[in-house]
Image: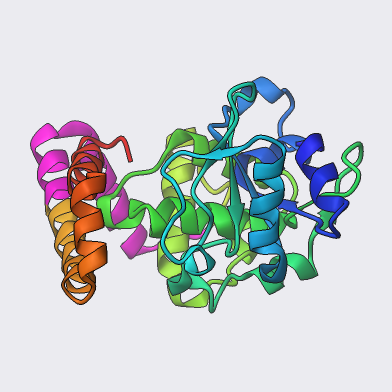
């Protein structure tokens, strides 16, 4: 991280580290062993996004899949890796998928970014923005609310955040208020901390907890629920890409040669198995 930060700083780019990596350097945990990290997520200003990618490549990082199509439109550049580094890096242009930018975007994060002692030249998101990103990532982007599932990692992060801020008051995602409260209540249940995050219970949160309980107790319910979701995602995603392929013959043949179709079939199977 310090190497990446120094490289970016020399070009006038100050990264904001997000999610697990940002939590680690921000002292969210009592011990670094509390949080496993698969990749290093960092947000840079959009004007410096592609420059940051080139800077990372200049110090030895490589792209797993080759140059992506229209990288300037991606939420983040595909993971970059280097053989001697244990974690990939994901350079973000946006903190979340476009659907949620109205409620949570780069400008908000940069306006409340926080310096980190011992890590000169870089920043982390403010504590309330950590909470919001945790919720969006867990319950909206990864369909946790739709499926009735949460990751223990995300719930534990929420618990750590609660030591620094009032989770009930962190509702800047107004259109998703009910889903946010559901997330707080199921997290309380998992940690056996009733009322810790949101003192008031709601009927809609009880229904969500019931769906979570059915997922935990019934393999049939879990698999059926997930299968319906994966099929709906596959159809929506597939139709969009098929339309793009048929309108661009070069893209169509590239998809065939690159194994795009088989890779996506594998991805959907992993989603069904709960690995994605």
Residue 57 left/right relative to 266: right
**Which secondary structure dominates the residues rendered in magenta?**
helix
The answer to whether one can see residue 206 in this image is no
Q: Nearer the viewer, residue 164 or 55?
A: 55
Residue that appears at 45% across and 77% down: 175
Is residue 135 within the magenta segment? no
Residue that appears at 17% across and 57% down: 234
The answer to whether one can see residue 78 in this image is yes
Residue 145 left/right relative to 66: left
Location of the N terminus (image quadrant): top right
Residue 221: x and y in percent read 12, 42
Find residue 84 and report its image quarter: top right
Residue 205: x and y in percent read 36, 58
Location of the C terminus (image quadrant): top left
Residue that appears at 41% across and 47% down: 186
Q: Nearer the viewer, residue 68 or 29?
A: 68
Find residue 166 and report its image quarter: bottom right
Q: Nearer the viewer, residue 244 or 120?
A: 244
The colour style of the image is rainbow
Residue 269: x and y in percent read 18, 39
Q: Is residue 33 above or below residue 276?
A: above
The boundaries of the magenta stretch are: 200-227
Q: How many marks?
A: 0
Q: Nearer the viewer, residue 154 or 124?
A: 124
Is residue 223 within the magenta segment? yes
């Amino acid at each position: 991280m310090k190497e990446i930060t120094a490289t970016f700083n020399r070009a006038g780019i100050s990264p904001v580290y997000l999610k697990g990596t940002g939590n680690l350097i921000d002292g969210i945990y009592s011990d670094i062993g509390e949080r496993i990290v698969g990749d290093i997520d960092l947000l840079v200003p959009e004007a410096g996004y592609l420059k940051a990618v080139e800077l990372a490549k200049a110090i030895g990082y490589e792209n797993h899949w080759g140059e992506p199509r229209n990288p300037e439109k991606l939420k983040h550049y595909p993971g970059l890796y280097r053989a001697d580094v244990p974690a990939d890096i994901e350079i973000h242009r946006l903190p979340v998928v476009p659907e949620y930018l109205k409620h949570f975007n780069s400008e908000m994060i940069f306006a409340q970014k926080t310096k980190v002692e011992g890590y000169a030249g870089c920043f982390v998101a403010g504590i309330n923005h950590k909470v919001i990103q945790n919720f969006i990532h867990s319950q909206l982007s990864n369909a946790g609310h739709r499926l009735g599932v949460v990751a223990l990692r995300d719930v534990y992060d929420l618990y750590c955040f609660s030591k620094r801020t009032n989770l009930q008051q962190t509702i800047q995602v107004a259109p998703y208020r009910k889903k946010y409260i559901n997330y707080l209540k199921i997290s309380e249940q998992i940690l056996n901390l009733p009322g810790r995050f949101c003192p008031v219970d709601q009927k809609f949160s009880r229904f969500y907890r019931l769906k979570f309980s059915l997922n935990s107790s019934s393999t049939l319910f879990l698999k059926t629920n997930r299968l319906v979701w994966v099929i709906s995602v596959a159809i929506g995603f597939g139709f969009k890409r098929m339309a793009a392929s048929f309108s661009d013959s070069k893209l169509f043949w590239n998809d065939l040669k690159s194994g795009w179709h088989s890779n996506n079939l594998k991805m959907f199977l992993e989603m069904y198995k709960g690995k994605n």
